[in-house]
Image (tube, rainbow, N blue to C red):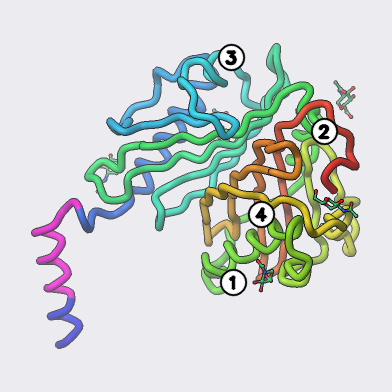
Amino acid sequence: MFAFTFRQALFLASTLLPTATAACNRSSLLLTVDQFLLGLTMGQAGPLENIADDFVYIENNKPAVIVSGIFNNILKIDFNRTIIDLTTCSTFTEVISSTSFKPFVLGAQIHHHPTDKYNSVYKIDTIVSTTGSWFFNASQTLHYALQEAWPVISPARQDTRQFLQKAADAYLDMWHNKSAIDAVPWGTPCARLEGSVYTGKGRPDDSCKVGIPTNNTQPPNSDRRYVVDEGMGTVSVLCNFEHLGNAPDSHLFRLEGGRLRFVHTITVVGGFGWSVGR
Ligand SMILES: *[C@@H]1O[C@H](CO)[C@@H](O)[C@H](O)[C@H]1NC(C)=O
Ligand SMILES: *[C@@H]1O[C@H](CO)[C@@H](O)[C@H](O)[C@H]1NC(C)=O
Ligand SMILES: *[C@@H]1O[C@H](CO)[C@@H](O)[C@H](O)[C@H]1NC(C)=O
Ligand SMILES: *[C@@H]1O[C@H](CO)[C@@H](O)[C@H](O)[C@H]1NC(C)=O
Ligand SMILES: *[C@@H]1O[C@H](CO)[C@@H](O)[C@H](O)[C@H]1NC(C)=O
């Protein structure tokens, strides 16, 4: 009886306050991702609809005019993977384009207004790497990305978004906090695809601890923006690698059964060697 009344109250609230309780529409989010990808293949942002009045475009951590950035290129998309966050009403899409005239590996968070009727898009936030970026080799990145399986995780085995985000934060804290190392839920096997460099050897004891920071008093990875998908066990974090000359960075973490399984990174820095910042 209580439940019924409670539901009635909720229903009433949603009729009276449609904007405050509107749900995040999954199909609408995926439609925008399709339009985003189509736009990349056409070299124009034109296919994007449902854009909010307060829309901003960010590329490599800087506000930009959308037509002057990645959309100024025509991409042939070899690989794309999208995660969906229905809590914050956002998505993250990983894109590898190795066969275009100019190769790209990019990550794009698309943020929608969670409460407006149409879930309009208020921010597209991209980290775009190309020739010259940190370990950039798109065909090699594609090769490794295609080897991995990221199946949907059954509801009983899903981690909570708080757990997933805490794991991502612990990892990104390692540069400035020594005790964060032990807070990361390391798993085995675990493979890291860092630009085009892969730590996975296809062995059961593959570890993502290879090459983790040994100097834990460096400037932090700041300005973190998140997209969390419990069904994919995946967290996207875009941030600023302060210790690498403020390099724009994307980290994608996949966990399975509470343990880190895959890490994909895109870091936009040119002219630095492997040892810098590590
Ligand atoms: C969700 O979005 C899709 C695609 O834009 C649209 O067709 C559908 O009507 C929306 N559903 C609701 C409940 O608003
Ligand atoms: C994105 O990937 C899916 C398979 O995961 C594929 O069906 C789709 O065609 C791809 N989209 C583009 C624009 O390449
Ligand atoms: C990228 O990697 C592939 C495969 O390892 C290699 O054949 C190719 O020469 C590399 N390209 C560049 C530009 O280094
Ligand atoms: C360092 O990381 C640990 C483990 O995540 C956390 O408990 C602690 O609060 C962090 N310290 C600082 C100064 O951020
Ligand atoms: C660690 O990083 C800090 C900040 O960049 C630097 O001052 C310090 O010299 C580094 N320590 C070592 C041992 O490299």
Q: Name the residue beneath numbered marker 1.
A: 157
- Mark 4 element type: strand
Q: Is 162 above or below relative to 249? A: below
Front position among marks 1 and 2: 2
Q: Which mark's residue is nearer the viewer, 4 or 1?
A: 4
Where is mark 3, residue-wise? 73
For this orientation, the residue located farthest to the bottom is 1
Q: Which of the two discs, 1 and 2, labels the residue nearer the N terminus? A: 2
Q: Residues within 10 Å of mark 2 (few under 14, many from 20)?
A: many
Residue 253 is labelled as 4
Q: Which residue is mark 2?
A: 135
Residue stretch rendered in magenta on the structure:
7-19
Q: Residue at x 32, y 45 (%)?
A: 113
- Distance CA(mark 2)–CA(mark 3): 21 Å
User: Mark 4 near mark 1, Cβ–Cβ under 8 Å?
Assistant: no
The percent position of residue 219, horizontal first and vertical second, equals: 72, 50
Occupied quadrant, residue 178: bottom right
Give the prevailing secondary structure in the magenta stretch: helix
